[in-house]
Amino acid sequence: MKTTENPVTLHGETEFEGIHISQTPGIKKHFQKILPEFDRVIEIGTFNGGLTLFIHRNKKESCELISYDIDPSVNQAPKDLDIDFRIGNCMSVPVINEIKDLIMDESKRVLLLCDGGNKNEEFNLFSKFLKVKDVVMLHDFAESSGEFSRIASVIGWIYSYESSLSEISNSVSKYNLDKYWYDEGKEVLWGSFIKKGDIL
């Protein structure tokens, strides 16, 4: 029987409602477990909008979804949905301040997804603004190139190893971050960290 979730395509990618997600096949199940925890999702790197649309369909109804990209021309997600698409470079001062304010809003538990052009830099820049229990994730992640190659070979992933623990370890320590669904996240090539605090 056909479902709304299309089968796995080439190179370990999946589709959602006809739009490429450009993610590993297991990402859907993984995100479905964690999305209900958050009040605001901030995505850096909309690209085709497939993952953005998936997040919209699987977040809790009250959760805000804000997605940034410098090039909206490739975004195929429907524009009549309650998704806040924003055009801007997340490394520019105005957008940095905008994202900072979105993260530091005490009324929202935030999930920040670093999936733009420089994932390590995005992580290192924005993780300093996280509140206790906020979560930051970065894509194309592994602890080492060998680990990335192992996972990529299993799922047929042909894309680059772009983020690593060594590149973000100073921020993890400095900003009091801990692993969050870490081993499961690595198997779908995402690194996941939560801001620690006394209430955890």
Image (spheres, helix red, strand yellow):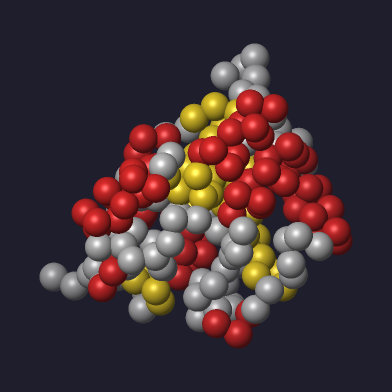
Q: Residue furthest left?
A: 1
Q: Residue furthest front?
A: 146
Q: Which part of the image, by quadrant, shows the N terminus? A: bottom left
Work out whether residue 30 or residue 13 is closer to the camera in this orientation and state it: 13
Q: Is residue 66 above or below residue 180?
A: below
Left or right: 50 as drawn, with respect to 10: right
Work out whether residue 146 or residue 54 is closer to the camera in this orientation and state it: 146
Q: Is residue 173 visible?
A: yes
Q: Residue at x 72, y 46 (%)?
A: 125
Q: Which part of the image, by quadrant, shows the C terminus? A: top right
Residue 56: x and y, percent? 51, 61
Work out whether residue 131 or residue 5 is closer to the camera in this orientation and state it: 131
Left or right: 138 as drawn, with respect to 146: right
Count numbered badges in the picture.
Answer: 0
Q: Is residue 33 visible?
A: no
Q: Residue furthest top?
A: 198
The image quarter containing residue 22 is: bottom left
Residue 16: x and y, percent? 36, 70
Q: Residue furthest bottom?
A: 73
Q: Is residue 80 above or below residue 23?
A: below
Q: Residue at x 54, y 27 (%)?
A: 178
Q: Residue at x 43, y 39 (%)?
A: 143
Residue 180: x and y, percent? 48, 32
Q: Residue at x 43, y 62 (%)?
A: 160
Residue 199: x and y, percent? 62, 17
